[in-house]
Amino acid sequence: MTSPESQSPTPQPAEPESKDRVYRSAPAIAGGVMLLGIAGWLGVDAVISGEGRTPWLALALLLLVVPLVVAFTLRPAVYAGDDRLRIRNPFRIVVVPWGQVASLRSAYSNEVLTESGAKYQLWAVPVSLRARKKAARREMRATAQARRQMGRDEGRGSALGTTEGLRQGFSREPLSDGPVRAETDRIMDDLRALHEARREAESARGEVTVRWAYEVLAPAVAGAVLVLVLVAMG
């Protein structure tokens, strides 16, 4: 018989790690895919049917253009975790612990300001003035509809003249769940709420780190040099 002391303890399941929230721009991704398709089609056609230096010039242009298109459309992303905000912009990756975030500002662009005074733009969360105007119009329509509904309910309660009538007249759910916001403004609201909840956490302390995206810069610079050399050679 096995003694209680010799029995191995039952392993406890590991707690799942909190995953980052990822924010990206769907229109930018769609535009990037379209641009890459056009560039690939024109480039391959030039390589196959071109003469002289044309194929080499086409390859050099592809080496220059493709990394830039990827950098400004497919690459930008914002990763919001419990401890830090990681910003992947076209040419840099910035990691800002929540304890170092001073504020998240929205004007003509969405930006994060650090305690040291540095400012970093959130390329993956662009401001759309058109979306803001559309949201404002929807908010105005919702407010007007709510006021009309309230007037009808008040009239119904007065006509019935009873407590039950008032209860029936004013028991409907509100027509709006809150202010209508543009999508990128809602994302910034989420980031502000996460910052407010986590900025005092011990694990959210640390230094801001910035890394250049050499995987994008190196091929783009090489392509630009090759284009200049081929053009200079005539």
Image (cartoon, rainbow, N blue to C red):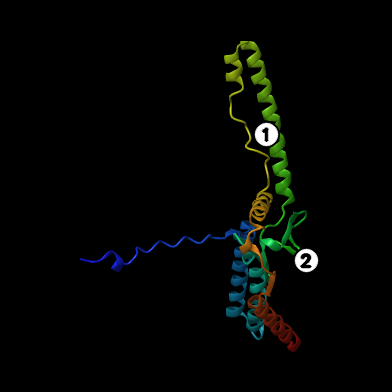
Point 59% across, 67% down: residue: 37
10 Å crowding of disc 2: few (<14), some (14-19), many (20+) = few
Q: Residue 184 in the image: x percent, y percent?
A: 67, 52
Q: Is residue 147 above or below residue 121?
A: above
Point 63% across, 62% down: residue: 202
Is residue 37 toward the left or the right of residue 134 in the image?
left
Q: Residue 158 in the image: x percent, y percent?
A: 66, 13
| Mark pair 2, 1: CA separation | 42 Å
Q: Quadrant of residue 170?
A: top right
Circle 2 sits on which residue?
A: 116
Circle 1 sits on which residue?
A: 142
Between 75 and 159, the residue placed more toward the observer is 159
10 Å crowding of disc 1: few (<14), some (14-19), many (20+) = some
The residue most toward the left is: 1
Q: Earlier in the sequence, mark 2 or mark 1?
A: 2
Q: Is residue 55 above or below residue 108?
A: below
Q: Which mark is residue 102?
A: none
> Hey, what amino acid is under mark 2?
Ser
Q: Nearer the viewer, mark 2 or mark 1?
A: 2
Q: Residue 51 in the image: x percent, y percent?
A: 63, 83
Cβ atoms under marks 2 and 1 closer than 8 Å: no
> Hey, what amino acid is under mark 1?
Ala
Between 229 and 219, the residue placed more toward the observer is 219
Point 69% across, 38% down: residue: 138
Quadrant in the picture for the C terminus? bottom right
Q: Residue 75 in the image: x percent, y percent?
A: 63, 67
Q: Is residue 212 above or below residue 144?
A: below
Q: Secondary structure at mark 1?
A: helix
Q: Quadrant of residue 108?
A: bottom right
Q: Quadrant of residue 152?
A: top right
Between 18 and 3, the residue placed more toward the observer is 3
Asked if one can make out residue 203 in the rendered structure from this viewpoint, the answer is yes
